[in-house]
Image (cartoon, grey):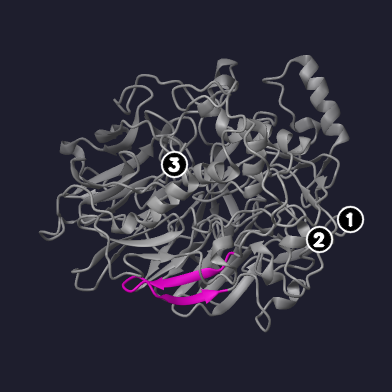
Amino acid sequence: MTSRGALLLGLVGLAACHAAPVSDIRATAAPSGIDWPVFGGSAAQSRYFSYGAINRDNVRRLQVAWEYPVTDGNIYQFSPVIVRGVMYVLAKNNSLVALDAATGRELWSKPGFQGISRRGLTYWRSADGKDQRLLVTAGDRLLALDARNGEAIDSFGEHGKVDLRENLGRDPASVRRVQSSSPGAIFEDLILLGSSPGEGYMSPPGDLRAYNVVTGRLAWVFHTIPRPGEYGYDTWPKDAWRYAGGANDWGDITIDAQRGIAYFPLGSPTYDYYGADRIGANLFGDCLLALDARTGKRLWHFQAVHHDLWDYDLTAAPQLLTVTHQGKKIAAVAQATKQGFLFVFDRVTGEPLFPVEERPVPPSTMPGEQAWPTQPFPVGLPVTARQKFAADDLTSVFLTPDERRAWLARITADRSGLFLPVNETETITVPGGVGGTNWGNTAADPAHGILYVMNQDFPSFYRLEKEERTHAPANAGPQQFTRAQVNAGESAYKLYCQVCHGGDRQGGNNGPALVSLQGRISYDELHTIVTKGQNRMPAQPHLDDDTITSLLAFLGGGSAPQFSVGADYPPGVAAPPAQYRTDYGLGFPHIMKPPWSTIMAVDLNSGKLLWKVPLGQDEQAAKLGLTGTGVPRGTQRNGMFVTDTGLVFSTAKDGHVYAFDARNGQVLWSGQLPMGTEGLPAMYMLGGRQYLVVDATTPLTWGAKSRESGIGSTLPAGQGGYVVFALPAQTHLEH
């Protein structure tokens, strides 16, 4: 088992490592074409591709142009970046690889990037083109590499790296993780970064930061949990910034480059489901926050959830559009949410273009908790997700009569409703922790004011459990796991681990057996493997410390890490008498009636829903004669983009990539992938030919279709890779 210390040492030394000589692609002028130079395609994150040759008439002719197989068996969730005829991907045992974007020929490969932000990287180029850089985060470090050969740039930061654990107002040694699972955004000579500090008690704050891409120096910081004298400080208890965490941007960052405004969709404060130590509205948790991209100065904000108790992070990219509002053209920004709401604002002033009402919501019954009495509801816009779970919403497709009766009794007895605070009895929350619209799930036709949204209807079954903590000294002996932790670990295992390691933990083609770990793995080792990745296992930095602890309990690992309420809170801070926790309650993906995942178009000029159709098809349901189901968890970690030729390309959890007619949602084409995908698709044009690329290296799960004949990948079943589609060469200029 690789130790945590050894792995982190390897990551720290990453920027200075030198492998065997690699090809140098400094030469030559860039081939003519249209690039996909950053995560999401552009700083605006509209996922909108102009000047396309693929259209409604010829999209059916798309076929595989080339593939870059991933033979190491690892699972990658990487979104390719394409610049100047070169595609950058993650492959070959966590190596950064540069490929010829026209042929897939390998140009260079740079090893040692285990622990990289799983979603991708960013590219920056100086005005004269002489300096081209890849900015990546790995092992809580920001690294700068020469884009032409992958070599570390020693003059950046300290010998090519910047420690992201610093400048958070906490002891850097106490910060277990902070790097974001998304790669950040480039504006002029700055890289703007969010973070993924975890979701447990005492997680670090989600400060927003900008670094100079040439020097690595910190340019500005915005405290998302305000400090004394800062705007919003009075929405928290005194000195909450010293112990409260989260309010972080782990999703997408959108930039209006013309106006120099950066839009950050921020997540919930921690702990997500019980906030007795953070009484108040908790700015800037769950806010759409507009900052001056050059200085980090707050321009305006809108809080979509006050005092979040449901993990309703904002994560989807804010979409920049021009809309006609009250007879005037308005530069707007639209935000889709996990609770199924859409909010639309004047991009400059933050004024809502559609009314927002503060409506009363239920109070909390938990000791010490004070739920906020109202929550914002948009008026005049469609609700994109189901927000209730009653008996009529229970599926009968996969349930025996006895199971259905049991579920009906359970649903009838449970509490359910939007913004209903979780307590010690079971509560059904819809959308749940991964429901609604998540990261990667929005795109736009910016000139015409059309917003495209993915949604998944997935309930969470929550129950808070009390955990009494002592004021044990730091050197106290080992703690025993509680039954609640073992139960939570079993749920987490089924959700995150079972697909690769098997329901019986005996392992399989995608992962080793985990049945004999009794006492053989420590918390620190498991934490490192889960959050950084190892061998075939991808990094899972979104899993918080409590979830990892519960997994350790279920897997029979070493003793629980020592916790102490009194010791954790800073001196002078009144700690709550107990902590309460819950798992995500996500073990029932098929329990609601389909469709489970959908894709839709909304006209933000009028606020009208133009169309809404299922996204993907569940194979188990199809075998029972049920079509148009979508796929459970069918939009989480999937993405889409729009073309100016009237197409919406989207991945789905059924192992296919789809082309929809942007006018009505009709499926015009689908391409089969060798495996599933969890990275954003990308599109680029090179030498007059237009390409679609998808990272397909994730095991097919949740009722995905079996491999079948048809247009799609020719890689052997079970072997993933980067799959590139294009029109046949002789027809690629047809319109």
Q: Which residue is mark 1?
A: 367
The amino acid type of the residue labelled 3 equals Ser
Q: Which residues are magenta?
A: 206-222
Horizontal arrangement in the rendering, residue 508 relative to residue 83 (left or right): right
Q: Residue 650 bears which disc, if any?
A: 3
Is residue 122 highlighted in magenta?
no
Residue 69 locus on image (x, y percent): 29, 33
Residue in the foreground of this view, choosing between 659 and 280: 280
Residue 174 locus on image (x, y percent): 59, 61
The amino acid type of the residue labelled 2 equals Ala
Q: Which residue is mark 2?
A: 276
Classify mark 2: helix, strand or loop.
loop
Residue in the foreground of this view, choosing between 715 and 356: 715
Q: Residues within 10 Å of mark 2 (few under 14, many from 20)?
A: many
Classify mark 1: helix, strand or loop.
loop
Classify mark 3: helix, strand or loop.
strand
Q: Residues within 10 Å of mark 1 (few under 14, many from 20)?
A: few
The amino acid type of the residue labelled 1 equals Pro
Residue contact at pointers 3 and 1, CB within 8 angstroms: no
Q: Residue 143 bears which disc, if any?
A: none
